[in-house]
Structures are given as structure tokens and as C-alpha cells.
Image (tube, rainbow, N blue to C red):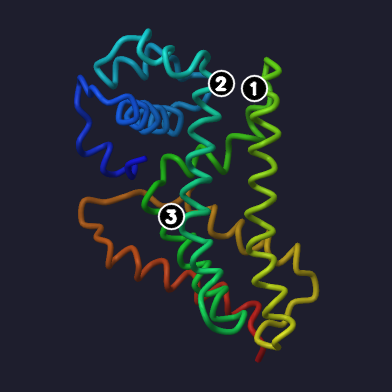
């Protein structure tokens, strides 16, 4: 799947490739859900923003809730894709946690629409899971969120074992660290002057600030 930024920049009114069209639908839906919320966003609205028909969207996603969950799912894909390599890199637990936190902060900035839907969606829109398939998707997404916390928790546990982190309650620490970074979806907004380098600088400062709270003195 293309990156959200690339899809947004190159959105074509008549993309022929089905995978490209799905990417376009997801990127447009993420923007609409971010701005308007689940209830106020309609398939009509998403189709108009794409310059497409409702039928095209329904061809890929049978209901608005299915599309909403697909946006969340892709947001999670992006989080895992960034955090997993950082968690596996060389170094003690503190160094790896710093890398994971920086990677996660970068993901928040580079795909803010997907991540805003991701962090707010599951809890706020349980009522959207109205069919057995949607309820199964919701359960799978909840499991993926738990798995992401477990990924970070494993790094924290390694840091406690090697003495680089001082944490009494690892699950609580993980929720606190992720909560701080996920809150970026509330205050961060892309600016025309943003560059990959400037975002990396912000991500690094956030990661170092958070690490200071759990690192061994």
C-alpha cells in the first residue's frame, strides 16, 4: 500500500489499479473521518472528495463501518511497520525504547489522519460494529492494539532486566508512554514548512523527554 502522503499528493480521479484505488479510498476516508467524525461522515462525502461514485466505494467496502475499521487497520499497519524494526535493533532496553518512541512519534506525524482515527475510533464507535463481520473486525483490531502494547512492553521488560530502565509497573509505563505520543493526534497539524528532518527533530525531542522519565539514573 502506498504511503498516505503519496496517495494524497497523487490522487487521480480515475485510478485503474484496484490496489491503488483502495489506497485512495482509505486516504480520503481517513481525512473525512478525522475532520468530521464517524457519524457526520457519509459515503457520499467521501465519494465527492474523491471525484468518484458511491458504487466504487461500496465495491471495496460494503458499509461505512467496514471502511472505518479498514482505516484503523491500516493506521495500525503503519505503527507496526515503524516500531518493529526499532524494537529489534541492537542496544540495551533504553536505547531500543528511545528508537521505538521516536519511530512511533514519526508515524503520528507522517500519517496523522489515519492515527487520529486509530487512537479515537475503537472506543468511540463500538456502535459501528453492527454485523458479525464487523464485530469480528473490532475484536481483531482490539487484539492488534494489545499486541502493539506488548511489543513496547517487551522492550521495557528488557530494559528493566539489563538495568537501563527503572520501571516498577511496566504495563502502566507502556500505556503512559503510548498515551503521550498518541496525544500528538490532538495537537499536531502538518504545516507547509514541515520536512522529514524537522519531523525527526520533533520526534527525537519527544522520545528523549519520555525516556528521561523511565531511564535509570
Question: Looking at the rendering, in which quadrant would you find the N terminus?
Answer: top left
**Residue at the spot x=30%, y=31% of the render?**
20
Q: CA distance from mark 1 to mark 3?
A: 26 Å
The answer to whether 173 appears left or right of 108 in the picture is right
The answer to whether 110 appears left or right of 195 in the picture is right
Residue 65 is labelled as: 2
Residue 74 position (above or below residue 195): above
Kindly report which numbered mark, 2 or 1, lies closer to the viewer in this rendering: 1
**Residue at the spot x=57%, y=76% of the render?**
211
Question: Looking at the rendering, in which quadrant would you find the C terminus?
Answer: bottom right
Cβ–Cβ under 8 Å for marks 2 and 1: yes
Q: In terms of depth relative to the viewer, which is nearer, 190 or 98?
A: 98
- In terms of image quadrants, where is residue 134? top right
Q: Please name the residue that numbered disc 3 is placed on.
A: 107
Q: Residue furthest bottom?
A: 217
- In terms of image quadrants, where is residue 210? bottom right
In percent of width and height, residue 161 lies at: 74, 83
Residue 150 position (above or below residue 55): below
Q: Please name the residue that numbered disc 1 is placed on.
A: 134
Q: In terms of depth relative to the viewer, which is nearer, 202 or 6?
A: 6
In percent of width and height, residue 63 lies at: 53, 14
Q: Residue furthest right?
A: 168
Q: Earlier in the sequence, mark 2 or mark 3?
A: 2
Circle 3 — which element?
Answer: helix
Q: CA distance from mark 2 to mark 3?
A: 24 Å
Amino acid at each position: 500500500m502506498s504511503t498516505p502522503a503519496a496517495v494524497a499528493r497523487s490522487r487521480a480521479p480515475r485510478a485503474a489499479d484496484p490496489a491503488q484505488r483502495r489506497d485512495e479510498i482509505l486516504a480520503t476516508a481517513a481525512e473525512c473521518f478525522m475532520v468530521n467524525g464517524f457519524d457526520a461522515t457519509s459515503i457520499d462525502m467521501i465519494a465527492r472528495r474523491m471525484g468518484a461514485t458511491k458504487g466504487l466505494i461500496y465495491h471495496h467496502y460494503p458499509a461505512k463501518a467496514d471502511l472505518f475499521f479498514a482505516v484503523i487497520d491500516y493506521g495500525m499497519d503503519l505503527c507496526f511497520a515503524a516500531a518493529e524494526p526499532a524494537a529489534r535493533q541492537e542496544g540495551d532496553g533504553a536505547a531500543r525504547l528511545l528508537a521505538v518512541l521516536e519511530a512511533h512519534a514519526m508515524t503520528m506525524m507522517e500519517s496523522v489522519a489515519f492515527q487520529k482515527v486509530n487512537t479515537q475510533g475503537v472506543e468511540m464507535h463500538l456502535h459501528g460494529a453492527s454485523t458479525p463481520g464487523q464485530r469480528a473486525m473490532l475484536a481483531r483490531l482490539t487484539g492488534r492494539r494489545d499486541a502493539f502494547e506488548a511489543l513496547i512492553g517487551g522492550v521495557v521488560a528488557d530494559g528493566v532486566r539489563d538495568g537501563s530502565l527503572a520501571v516498577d509497573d511496566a504495563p502502566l509505563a507502556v500505556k503512559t508512554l503510548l498515551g503521550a505520543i498518541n496525544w500528538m493526534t490532538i495537537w499536531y497539524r502538518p504545516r507547509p514548512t514541515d520536512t522529514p528532518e524537522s519531523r525527526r527533530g520533533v520526534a527525537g525531542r519527544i522520545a528523549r523527554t519520555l525516556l528521561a522519565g523511565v531511564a535509570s539514573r
